Amino acid sequence: MSKYNPSQIEKKWQEYWQKNQQFLAKDFSKKPKKFILVEFPYPSGAGLHMGHLRPYVAADVYARFQRMKGFEVLFPIGWDAFGLPAENYALKMGVHPSITTAQNIKNAKKQMLSWGLSFDFSREINTTDPHYYKWTQWLFLQFLKKGLAYEATGVINWCPKDKTGLANEEVINGECERCGTKVEKKELKQWYLKITAYAEKLLEGLKTLDNWPEAVKLQQKNWIGKKTGINITYNFENNRNYVLLHGFNGNPEGIFFPWLKSELDKRGLRYQCPVLPHPNAPTEEEQVSFVLQNCKFDENTVLFGHSLGAVVAMKVAEKLNHKIAGLILAGGFSTATFRDKPRPFHSTFNWEFDYKRIKSITGFIKILSDPTDYAIRIEQGKILQKNLGGVLWESAGEKPHFTSEEEPVILKALSPQIVCFTTRPDTNFGATFVVLGPEHPLLKDRNALNIEEKKWKEIEKYKQKAGSQAEELRTAETRKKTGVFTGLYAINQLNNYKMPVYVADYVLGNVGTGAVVGVPGHDKRDFEFAKEFNLEVKRVVQKDANDIGSIDHIDKVQEEAGTMVNSEFLNGLNIHDATAKIMDFMEAQGYGKKVVNYKLRDWVFSRQRYWGEPIPIIHCEDCGIVPVPEKDLPVKLPNVKKYEPTGTGESPLAVIKKWVEVKCPKCGKLAWRETNTMPQWAGSSWYWLRYTDPKNKKAFSSIKKQKYWTPVDVYFGGMEHTTLHLLYSRFWNQFLFDQGLVSSREPYMMRKPHGIVLGPDGEKMSKSRGNVVDPQIVVKKFGADTLRMYELFLGPHEAQVSWDDKGIVGVKRFLDRVWKWTADSGQRTADSKASEKAERALHRLTKKITEDIENFRFNTCISAFMEFHNEVKDEAIDEASIKKFLILLYPFAPHIVEELNLTLGNKTLLQKEKWPEFDASMIVDKEVEVVVQVNGKVKGKIKVAAGSGEEQAKSSALQLEPVKKSLVNDSVKRVIFVKDRLINLVI
RNA sequence: GCCGCGGUGGCGGAACUGGCAGACGCAAUAGACUCAAGAUCUAUCGAUCGCAAGGUCAUGAGGGUUCGACUCCCUCCCGCGGCACCA
């Protein structure tokens, strides 16, 4: 018998498997199916590394095992070849990414084959293949159709090194997920996928995934970040009195006026709303003097006019001989014509205004103009603003010309409010201030809140400073709290507390409503702010009677145990009951509205790079955003020489005029292609579906084949994809399920993450550290079977392990011994019999391996093989038993066992064998050792027949010398007996 | 700060549902074979006291429950991962 020569036999078997296509998955087989998936790799220039090996080997063991168990197994692989590394590598080498990618794939595939992986390569896919990305583009258009893909301008994460925008998920600790560069903020027009529309469904789906690790589910749950709370609306302190003037042919009971009055009543605000004389045939003289005589004006008056009422208001303001607080105009300042005809009342009004005079007596001016207004055009609002100053709100009313029953925009102009989101309304009796984030929309213009000129200058300065700061600087925890007082006060409806309103950068514009109600007694940040600005600290949750408000130890445990105080009807409740009660109360009173907030943001889907799927959109001046017609898909990447990223926020594709310019599919006019490409994660968001039907030219995959194969039974992959690929692909699958395009709501029944493989020094493997272990060197030196088994032997699949070459020899020695043991058939003949000990050991091993593979405990399988071998190597054994052993070993070390099977003279391949069964009665030896304890201390062991009862064990135990010794002065009071295991005598 | 996971010999790790802690492997030591080295084989291998039989202490620390705790409960320490001025 020759020596075990792995490189020789492994090559032979690998070639045999490929040539004879041994691992093809058959569609619609009568066997039950198993779809075993492992994350497909990026074909990088450096080749596959130990990190790839780990899940591939585990998945391969599992797949080979399931085939023997009688399942039709789909175990596919492909290439996730778009994206930055491929492109950066290509840029560095000066070769087109399509060429380097093809080379890298060839190399990686060679590696995979050398590891003896049993992939079905007939279903191989490649995300950069136009036949594949045609469907990625098509799927994008499905999102567009349903309004879940949209273009918007926003401040996004920008990697200055990779020169592209990033999704929130791609920013890890403020750094680019790919290159580790500090991420910056940049305002860009980008495509987004509306993943937030699926926040709730993604969360709900997690509850159905019983075979996912809790840690993965929890991480996704935290990322989605559902928060239930309440948006509380606060009014500002307001001692104004309003004069409301209705328009032509109107009266105080028409259109929105009754509603407006009742809303002002609700807020306890004073107003006068006169019926103007002769509303059908108004004259300036009559209306203006009527208002001046019948309404009272003082410095707190806000004059409001709608339509013609606005003209009257301006005329009234001209004539007043003292200052008023403000002037609000909703339409009505039109010049001569109405629907291109002279207005009936035009001749009776003087349309010249003394703008200077009006400006000088009014504290603030707001002009509400509406693009949908049929009577007064928006341009006229702009002209008026030019003359009067103030703020122009181009906001649309509920109905054109503000003629709805309810016009919230007008109410907002008259009496602004702040909305604060909180998850802790139970502490609201302790609110003592309000903070607006610098980005808050009410701070866009001084007039929005009518902030004093002097204060406004301070605020503007503060806003500028906050905006120029990088986010992580601004949010650094050690930072002192800063802010500016606005001069305004908000009123807490619960107790009429006058809460000063501040602007401070510790409140972030993109969180909640961008405004916070400050409860310094029960929030650390609010407390720090209150200390900085000498604001009152009120405590409303008390742990016990002695706890009287030392504030330096706000902590959650204490709050959980505390009860409400100083909170009127909440007093005595715990914080949870108080929260529920006050939420209901506030909603009933109209103070606020219960809301659900998510941390999840929409998925930024544009990348300003060359090597990605072009987004299949055409921009037309007349038709706007036009999807590329399906018949024109795929939109292929142009094959060009220059594709360096520009860094300007524009895609390198933008300069390729020949490609960009295109006829609008709708109107035929010259239009422009969208030049951004899709992110790395696009192609992988649906790839497993393609495996079920990889050659389909009519659809991304047929629902019929999906119904046989999906969902994926086990998905092997890395923990690092939990809030990236794993979340994204669940989103796509759920969306496609809702469109009836896929057959299961969740794509993956079971997720099996693996721990990362560290270098021998316990550090992350990296070239710069010089601790990278190349799997190919191990293959060369020890063979793939040793590599596979040693990798599994390192530790539990989910645990982080360090690759230490030192231990490899142990596995190699084991395989050497197996080789010798099997081949040493000299003293065995076909009719030799296995000893009973060996037979029982084999049954035990069968049980152990079967159960451990099913539970993904591969490391203990390897130990069990070694243990078995140590135990039976000197026992009599028959060939049938050896073969059974080889079958058990087959998933782990397929090359050597197939070879050994041949030497035994067997003609059929081991892989065609059925997985062995075990006999439960053969698991335990006939005679077992039972541990004898006295008071829980081991005194010795006795041998009894398996299944012996307590009496027999006790009598044998009492014979033991050490037991006798212990019993000299005592008697047995109690006996604890565990069958076949232990007997404990308590004395 | 919050959430999750973990801490066992010189090292990687076993230990079922609370039942002999340290399986299996590496390294180490001694021996056999060899002119020698390597490979292989045999034996030893948690600490400690003891000539030995045997005893004592040991699963991050301290306490508790139990006949019995690596395993369950409480407090604390350390490491890793996620989130984070998130309201």
Image (cartoon, coloured by chain):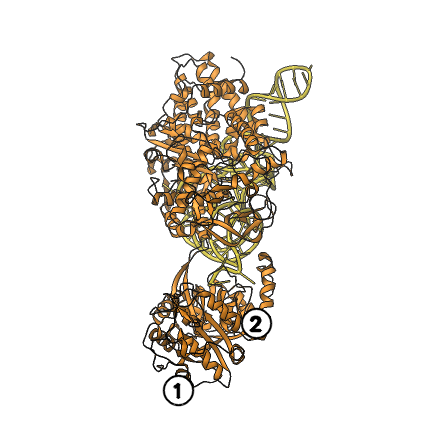
- Dot 2: few (<14), some (14–19), or many (≥20) neighbours within 10 Å? many
Residue type (three-letter) at the residue carrying disc 1: Asn
Residue position for label 2: A456
Tag 2's secondary structure? helix
Viewer can see residue A521: no
Q: Is residue A678 left or right of residue A778?
A: left
Foreground pick, A640 / A387: A387
- Identify the chain drawn in orange: A
Task: Give the quarter of the image for residue A953.
Answer: top left
Q: Position of residue A665 (x, y in %)?
A: 42, 42
User: Can you identify the residue that label 1 sits on?
Assistant: A294
Instruction: Place residue A459 in its image quadrant.
Output: bottom right
Residue drawn at x 46%, y 12% as measured from the top left? A827
Locate residue A460, reporting x and y percent: 58, 68
Q: Amino acid at mark 2?
A: Trp
- Colour chosen for chain B: yellow
Question: x%, y% of residue A517?
Answer: 48, 68
